[in-house]
Structure formats: C-alpha cells, structure tokens
Image: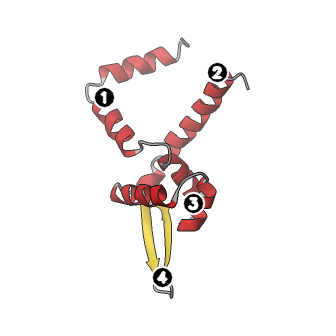
Amino acid sequence: MEANVIPLMQEVACHKAAVLHIKDALETLSGKWKLPILGALSSGPKRFKELAKEVGGITDKVLSKELKDMEMNHLVKRTVYDTFPPTVEYSWTDHSRTLGDVMCALENWGKLHRKTVIGG
C-alpha cells in the first residue's frame, strides 16, 4: 500500500460519522447511471433524448426513473418551457456542482484502476 494512502485511511477510520456519511453518499449516487448522467449534463442543459443519446445504453424507462430520483435529491433541475409541445430540459444544480471534485477523483482512480488491472 502506498504511504500516502495510510494516513487518509486512518483519518477516515478515526472519524466516527464517516461511515454514515459514506453510506449517504453511496446511496444517493448508487447504480451505474447517476454519475454518467451528471457527466453528460456537465456540458450544459440537455433534453431527455439528448441525454439518453449522450449517456448511451440506458433505456428511456431507467433514465426517467434516475432523473426523478436525482431531482428528488437535488442533483438535477427539471425545467419545463411553455412551448407546444412542452420542452423539458435537465441541468446541474448548485448541489450537484459540489460533486465536481468527487467526479474528477473517480475519473482519476478509474484510470489508475484500469491501468493496474488491465494494464492499459
């Protein structure tokens, strides 16, 4: 184990509420779609079909469920425009912007993990 990892692990282990906070975060971001959805929205608001296309591989039913859950957790904002037919856009919220560092850290760890496990 790398030397710089041990102090971090000890710091987390010493923080009695850490497990609760980690569980809350994982529950809110659980599943394979929430972070990719947020990643797709990072470049700006998207309509439902644009989002489905950019995320790729997600069904409309699952995307709809994930967006409702994310809206409930203040991770996406749903804006309905008064047009015919109604136009609906999804975007980041101030709360989801606080995940920027987490998403970058996950990206970096994913690269390291891929290199370690796959070798590429």
Are dots 2 and 1 in contact, CB under 8 Å?
A: no
In three-dimensional space, the C-alpha distance between marks 2 and 4, rounded to whole angstroms, equals 47 Å
In three-dimensional space, the C-alpha distance between marks 3 and 1, rounded to whole angstroms, equals 33 Å
Observer-side mark, 2 or 1, equals 2
Are dots 1 and 4 in contact, CB under 8 Å?
A: no
Between disc 2 and disc 1, whose residue precedes? 1
- Residue 14 position (above or below residue 59): above
Q: Which residue is mark 4?
A: 86
- Residue 2 position (above or below residue 57): above
The part of the image, by quadrant, that contains residue 111 is top right
In three-dimensional space, the C-alpha distance between marks 2 and 1, rounded to whole angstroms, equals 27 Å
Residue 13: x and y in percent read: 34, 20
- Can you tell which mark lies on residue 52? 3
Q: Which residue is mark 1?
A: 19
The residue at the point 59 percent across, 54 percent down is 55
Instruction: Tally the numbered discs.
Output: 4
Q: Which residue is mark 2?
A: 117
For badge 1, the amino acid type reads Val
Residue 94 appearing in the image: no
Between disc 3 and disc 2, whose residue precedes? 3
Observer-side mark, 3 or 1, equals 3
Between disc 3 and disc 1, whose residue precedes? 1
Observer-side mark, 3 or 2, equals 3
For badge 3, the amino acid type reads Ala
Identify the element where label 4 is drawn. Answer: loop
The residue at the point 44 percent across, 53 percent down is 96
Residue 21: x and y in percent read: 31, 35
In the image, taking residue 8 as reference, residue 107 lies left or right, namely right
